[in-house]
Image (cartoon, coloured by chain):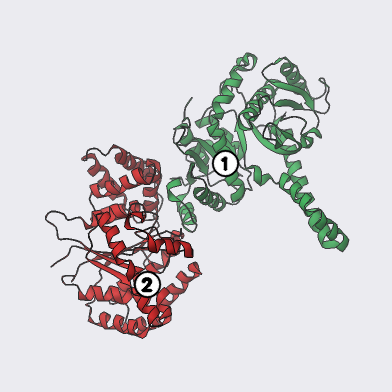
Amino acid sequence: MSWRHVYRWDLDKTYLETDFESVRRLLTIAFEKPEEKTNVPGSAALLRELSREREGELPSRVAIVSGSPRQMRKTLEAKLELDGVVWHEFHLKPQWENLRRGRFRAVREQVGYKLPLLLRSRLKTDGLTGVRETLFGDDAEVDAFIYSLYGDVVGGRVQVDELVSVLKAVGAYEDAIGKSVAAAEKLPAEDVVERIFIMLDARTPPAFFRPFGPRVIPIFNYFQAALVLFSGGHLDAEGVIAVARAFLERDGRSADDLANFVQDVVRRGHLPGSALQDLGLAVQELTNVANEAEVIWKAVQRFVDLGSARRFLPPQPPEMDYEALLTHLRSRHR
Amino acid sequence: MPGATVTPGRPTTIALDCMGGDHGPVEAVEAAAQLSLSRPDFHLILVGDVNELGPLLDEREYEPGRISFRHTPDWITMEDSPRTAMDDKPEASVLVACHLVADGRADAVVTAGNTGAAILAAARKMGRIPGVRRAALAAVTPTEQTHGPNEDPFALLLDVGATLTASARDLVTFAIMGSAYAEAISNNPRPSVALLSNGTEAHKGPPEVVGAHEMLAELSEVNFAGNVEGLDIPRGSVDVVVTSGFLGNVVLKMLEGIGEVISELAKDAYARRFLWRFGLTMLSSGLRQIQQALDWEQYGGAPILGFSQPIIKAHGRSKARAIGNACKVAVKAARSDMGRVIERAVAKVPSVEEEGTQA
């Protein structure tokens, strides 16, 4: 089977609003029913649109990689079904096994859990040669780091000795290092990671992610992601409208708020003005989108407001120093 | 009247001139970022050089739905001649901010820049209220007595520097505008208004003050309390004190200076002798209250009265807190429909309107 594109999603704080900040909330989350779980605004609409089958096109592959314990599989799968999302892989963390085997570092550590999983998923899935990927994470953990490292390992820019050194630095167990190295050695070098969206759930300032280069796109919401994905040909205008509607109708946002979101992502260099023009033209062809069309017209005005100001897309770093990046990320979470 | 009327339920939008203050755009951007997180009821349009403002915002926590930018590479400095700059820099940030209000895209302007430029920009883009010949900068000053039903610990002093001189009729207009402002913003149903002079008697003072006294004494629309002297300002004998811009500015700066000197003297005394340190520690809560009352940053900015839409002038050396408070004052003024309130008050007084307006 061949695939058009791969979308890899984290769940907690990326797809679902999850508050781990207190033991009470943690217990509440564990016993929540699928219908009680709350989406990050727009996440369900966006993932639904990305996974939707399109006539005459290859299907997109959706892979969920979550740090939630495996015991929650039934509830989380039921939640995704309720949201109308189609997925092809669903990975959860073996927390009980980690505790049973005394691997306490692995309970919190994410790099040693997610990186081998991502690499093995890429290696073991048929029909992925040359297929590009878009990854979704958040700023609560080290998703920008894991996804960037994954992209550079697959792209052949991180050699085995550096990979081992980085994994040791994060405290990954030997078996995780071994699995990562084995997969990395077998994967053909392909530059497949197109974009990494980081949801700013913890309100980290966007400039904090500049050292990761332009591939990492900090977003404040999934309307911004939908716009960028539209510019990359992943979504059509109807898809963007569906996400905008989620914000207008279910999140209580105004057309002005959404127009400001557009200007923000344009100003930061992640959305070209031509995409806004294309979106405006496409929306003219749609019916029953008066409210969403108002957003687009206001956004065009905001675009004009930027005038000749430069766009501040982060420059591509000459080479990624992953140990320095890890220190940088941890400085925020300390 | 051009511009937008604040619609209930719609967030009030402030056009914030980010370029003019002594500290550059960093403090304005910091204020905007903080307000975007704490005040869901209003939006900010940051006016200025986005090449500078954008990276500053990106280094901060902010809510992007409540902030947008209007790029303009020009601004008027404190050294620029306001009148010349109006023509030389038609895209100056303060002019653009006023244009956004006139165009209905924003409800009020806040600027920490050149006062003269702010007044001329407002006159050019938003227009003066019919009957108002000169605008007035109205500042709040801390007082011993409280004012109005909210028991505000401050009185309104105007003009504090919009213009140097004022005729008798200008002073009467200032009195009407100050009274209307205090009524709308402080919910004070009939604020007392006085002229600043060198004696309480009606004949004391320069001719324009004596003339204004005669006219105000005849006006039933203003709760005129006669003349007050300088010492009545900190005492808070009246709710609104009216004077010319030159004198008002001198008084305001002197009050600010006294506050800063008291604070410095206390610090000095604390460092010098153990007994003084002990005494100051015992008095610390009282001293803190005095310091708070004299802290100009907490009062935000001063409204420039006389224009059809609100424009708030923040102190040139404002930091983020003061600019944030100035934005809150602007929101309040916009929601009170300040321009129309003053227009109605001025229109009720035919003798003032007859004189007409000057450009």
- Toward which corner of the image does residue A285 lie, by quadrant? top left
SS type, badge 1:
helix
Under mark 1, the amino acid is Lys
Q: Residues within 10 Å of mark 2 (few under 14, many from 20)?
A: few
Q: Considering depth in this image, is A107 or B269 the residue closer to the camera?
A: A107
Under mark 2, the amino acid is Pro
Q: Would residue A26 appear left or right of B177 to someone viewing this image?
A: left
Q: Considering depth in this image, is B35 or A321 the residue closer to the camera?
A: B35
Answer yes or no: are tags 1 and 2 on the same subunit: no
Q: Position of residue A274 (x, y in %)?
A: 28, 49
Report which residue position mark 2 lands on.
A318
Looking at the image, is mark 1 or mark 2 nearer the viewer? 1
At 22% from the left and 58% from the top, the residue drawn is A51
* Mark-to-mark CA distance, 1 and 2: 45 Å
| Residue A139 position (above or below residue B48) | below
Q: Position of residue B242 (x, y in %)?
A: 71, 28
Instruction: Tell which chain the image draws in green.
Output: B
Q: Considering depth in this image, is A72 or B151 the residue closer to the camera?
A: A72
Callout 1: residue from which chain?
B
Q: Position of residue B236 (x, y in %)?
A: 76, 34
Q: Position of residue B115 (x, y in %)?
A: 61, 38
- Asked whether the viewer can see residue B85, the reply is no
Report which residue position mark 1 lands on.
B328
- Toward which corner of the image does residue B204 lie, by quadrant? top right
Number of numbered labels in the structure image = 2
| Residue B206 position (above or below residue A135) | above
Chain A's colour is red
